[in-house]
Image: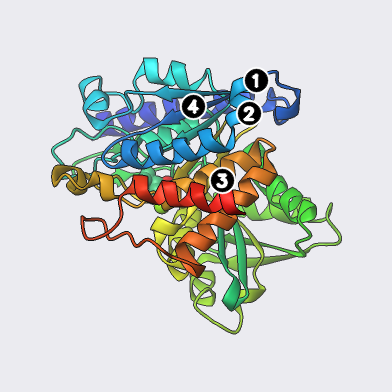
Amino acid sequence: MQAKIEAAKEAFGKLLTEQLARVEEMKSQGDFVDYKSLDQITIGVCGGDGIGPAITGQAQRIMEYLLKDEIASGKVLIKNIEGLTIERRVAENAAIPADVLAELKTCDVILKGPTTTPQKGDPWPNVESANVAMRKALDLFANVRPVRIPEQGIDWTFYRENTEGAYAVGSKGVHVTEDLGVDFTVVTSQGCERIIRAAFEFAKANGKTRVSAVTKANIIKTTDGKFLETFREIAKEYPGITADEWYIDIMTAKLVDEKRRRDFQVVVLPNLYGDIITDEAAEFQGGVGTAGSANIGKKYAMFEAIHGSAPRMVKEGRDIYADPCSVIRAAAMLLAHIGFNDKADKLYKALDICTVTEKKLVMTGRDTGATGAQFADYIMETIEKL
Ligand code: IPM
Ligand code: MG
């Protein structure tokens, strides 16, 4: 028994050393990259698994159409990154194969399709989620997820911490004995500060008057406690913005309260709570398939759909019918992030026309509806007429 405890302590010690190294790395980081100062912006398109290549391919066609002039002049380079597939990841027992990661690091921003995350019982070994690995490897600490339902007065922006909490060492828990398992939740001052500051800065820049923090600091006292403490400190620097605090359980309830929910504006929260709440929020908007997600760091940023890779659709030969909307929405977020706001606005408008107001094509996920390519054509024709 003592030997088992010693082994667990050793594993824990290793984690602490790794996490302290991460703290040092965060301390040495500069400011956010200024895309205007770059001679060339490289956009990597990483299709991923399952329906990923089919839907990101359509989003890429739209980006190439919108960025024609910039591509011709060399201001923008679009690069395809192959190999982030479950087969390669399993063969190399790596969340992201080394050559793929090296390619990703040559880009400034990345548009990523869904990637399969193995879970217990799957035929795959338990390789770490490629999403989570990419967020960590590129230090994409802010997961920004907007949810808008104008007719209900809902305009929420979630700032989910993306590199710490339950995810930081989520695949490195310890089975101390056959009966006792322990996972770890990690928080750092630097990690809390940068996500909370990002949320307040977003609020300030976009005329938002309220930022809400969500934790379970009454129970998870150390890590959530630090998050909340940091929130209170940073809030003092933004006197024009109301800062309020919620526990995750009651926040989950309030989001279904039609009288109260429209009052929320910007919500900042640790990783796991952000994961859960943003699925709930996206559901009101029409499902997780309708939401895009921005993963932003100081040096890199990655934009993705938040739905899965739907391997069954590929097996049944239906990937050409997969709905590319959410990854097209992610492409719009990408364009806005690198400073092409006018192009992003056009794309948002076209998405609205094509999926809500005009809706000339219907996607059913099978041959009873339009293909992703037809939908992308429809978007481009709509932009042409704006
Ligand atoms: C998300 C997803 C991922 C997460 C999965 C696919 C690893 O649910 O982006 O919200 O848990 O973060
Ligand atoms: Mg999720």
- Of the residues under marks 2 and 3, which one precedes in the sequence? 2
Question: How far apart are the two marked residues, 3 and 1, measured between alpha carbons?
Answer: 21 Å
Q: Please name the residue shown 57% across and 40% down the image.
A: 334
- Report x, y in % for residue 84: 33, 27
Question: Is 267 positioned to the left or the right of 56 in the image?
Answer: right
Question: How far apart are the two marked residues, 4 and 1, measured between alpha carbons?
Answer: 18 Å
The amino acid beneath tag 2 is: Asp
Q: Which residue position holds label 2?
A: 69
Say above or below: 57 vs 106.
below
Say above or below: 38 vs 165.
above
Q: Nearer the viewer, residue 212 or 306?
A: 306
- Report x, y in % for residue 48: 34, 34
Question: How far apart are the two marked residues, 2 and 4, measured between alpha carbons?
Answer: 18 Å
Q: Please name the residue shown 27% across and 50% down the image.
A: 321
Q: What mark, if any, has residue 73 been given in the picture?
A: 1
Secondary structure state at the residue bearing disc 4: strand
Q: Which residue position holds label 3?
A: 332
